[in-house]
Image (cartoon, helix red, strand yellow):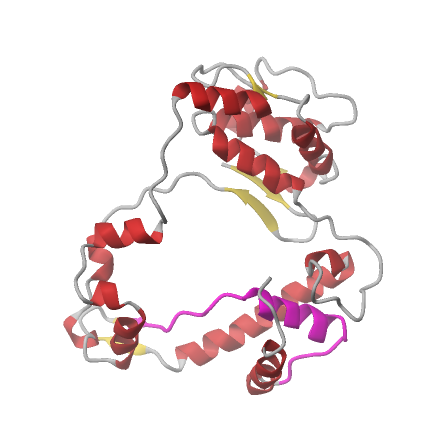
Amino acid sequence: MIRVRSIFNGFLLLPVAVALGGISQAFAWPDDLKHSDLYEKWKTDNPELASGTDPAKIMGGLMGPERKLKTAKENQELFNQYCIGNSESAEVPNPNYHNDKVMRAARILSKVADLNFYFYSDIKRIYKKGSVAAPSGISENAHLFLIQTCGEFRDRAEIIEGKVKWVNNMIMLGEKSQKNPVDLKANIWTQLSGQSYNRYLELSNQIFSMKQKEAYSNKQISSSLHQEAQEPVDGYSVCETKFIISELIAKNKNVATFDEYKNQFRSFAKKCSQD
């Protein structure tokens, strides 16, 4: 796995495959919780799971339609667009800098400070063997990042394609003053200044803690497990992120109480798009 910490305390993550095991056990509820409000809410939100549908089929539905894997030839053809080497070989590949998207990704990654890159030492040592030098103007870490992307996902070239496109869409927050008002029809992240990003982290953490505290007040106790089952905390929607940036950060406002926050957001959400 390759992780790049951003210069603003966040992080960018290239995920690896995750093995899913014990799927059927994920839907087993303790008897004492089956009479709780939490369980009733779960049944309402997950009717197929509550009705005893085969968990394997449920997981298949959650993962979307079945995807056909590429043949070795198709994979190599796509691999060649972004990397140089044999996708079926263990040799260290190289980025295909003749591809404009690969070169643009390298230039973007070169703007990230070296101290914000993190590579596992053993993997880094392997991929540095036999690799060609980085092109002029491209940092060593940006070059190595792309080499490892080619190497780690050589058998699934569409993942390499996705990573390169992902880097091409990275937004580097500027040092300009925070824009106000914020254009809700434009990309919200391009309108957030670098100085305001720390403020965004502080506010989002504060609001999450408020949500968590409210969810905790609705906890259910499982006597058989001797554990507490807590209501989950919803993540931030696109609309809520727009609200935090445009109404709180850009206007330099604070959150006094959670009830006040919820009321203000409800009013804002009526005119907000999830785009």
Asked if residue 255 is positioned above or below residue 162 in the image, the reply reads below
Residue 259 falls left or right of residue 38: right
Instruction: Specify the segment rendered in magenta.
Output: 228-256
Does 197 appear in magenta? no
**18 or 52, which is in the foreground?**
52
Identified at 55% across, 86% down, the residue is 259
| Image spot of residue 1 (x, y percent) | 49, 36
Identified at 40% across, 69% down, the residue is 232
Asked if residue 20 is positioned above or below residue 274 in the image, the reply reads above
View extreme (right): residue: 176
**183 or 36, which is in the foreground?**
183
Identified at 76% across, 56% down, the residue is 194
Quadrant (top left/top right/bottom left/bottom right) for the C terminus: bottom right
Does 232 appear in magenta? yes
| Image spot of residue 192 (x, y percent) | 74, 60
| Image spot of residue 138 (x, y percent) | 74, 27
Looking at the rendering, which quadrant does residue 128 occupy? Answer: top right
From this viewpoint, is residue 23 visible? no
| Image spot of residue 210 (x, y percent) | 52, 77
Looking at the rendering, which quadrant does residue 246 occupy? Answer: bottom right
